[in-house]
Image: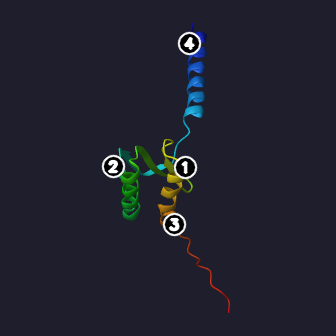
Amino acid sequence: MTATILKLVFIAIGLFLVYKLIFGGKKGLTIFEMHFKDGRMTQHKGKIPERFERECRQMAKTEKLTCTIRAEKNSGVRLHISANVNDNLQQRIRNQFPFEYYDKKTVDNSRQAG
C-alpha cells in the first residue's frame, strides 16, 4: 500500500519537473506593451519612450494598424511586433526604437598610464 503511494508521489513529482522544464521557459522582463486597433492605441502599459510612442501612433494612424508592439529585456532588449504587420513597416518601427536608451553603460575605472 505505501509502496504504491510512494510510486505515485514520485511519478507526480517527475511529471511536474518535466512540465516545468518544457513550459517554464521564462520570458524576459516586459518593459512596455502597446496595443493598436484600426490605427488607434487602445491600451498600453509600461514606460514607453515619448518619441517612439509618438512615431508609432503616427505610423499606426496612416497605415490603420491592428497589432501589438512589446519590448522585452532578457540579456538585451528585443522588440516584438505582431506577425500581421508587413516586413517593411516592422523595419520602420524597429528603426524608430531607441535601442541605445536601454544599452548598459559601462564605466571604465582603470587609469591610463601616461
Label 1 – label 2 distance at C-alpha: 20 Å
Instruction: Return the disc, 3 or 1, that comes first in the chain's sequence.
Output: 1
Callout 4 crowding tier (Cα within 10 Å): few <14, some 14–19, many ≥20: few
Q: Is residue 26 above or below residue 3?
A: below
Instruction: Return the disc, 2 or 4, that comes first in the chain's sequence.
Output: 4
Point out the frontmost of discs 3 and 1. Answer: 1
Query: Would residue 78 be seen by someone viewing this image from the given angle?
Result: no
Label 2 amino acid?
Met
Q: Position of residue 16 (x, y in %)?
A: 55, 26
SS assignment at label 4? helix
The N terminus: image quadrant = top right
Question: Disc count in the image?
Answer: 4
Label 2 – label 4 distance at C-alpha: 55 Å
Point out the frontmost of discs 2 and 4. Answer: 2
Label 4 amino acid?
Ile
Instruction: Return the disc, 3 or 4, that comes first in the chain's sequence.
Output: 4
The residue that appears at 38% across and 47% down in the rendered structure is: 64
Q: Position of residue 27 (x, y in %)?
A: 52, 44
Marker disc for residue 100: 3
Q: Are marks 1 and 2 in contact (CB under 8 Å)?
A: no
Residue with the mark numbered 2: 41
Label 3 – label 4 distance at C-alpha: 56 Å
Q: Position of residue 63 (x, y in %)?
A: 41, 50
Point out the frontmost of discs 4 and 1. Answer: 1
SS assignment at label 2? strand
Residue with the mark numbered 1: 87
Q: How is the image coloured?
A: rainbow
Label 3 – label 1 distance at C-alpha: 22 Å
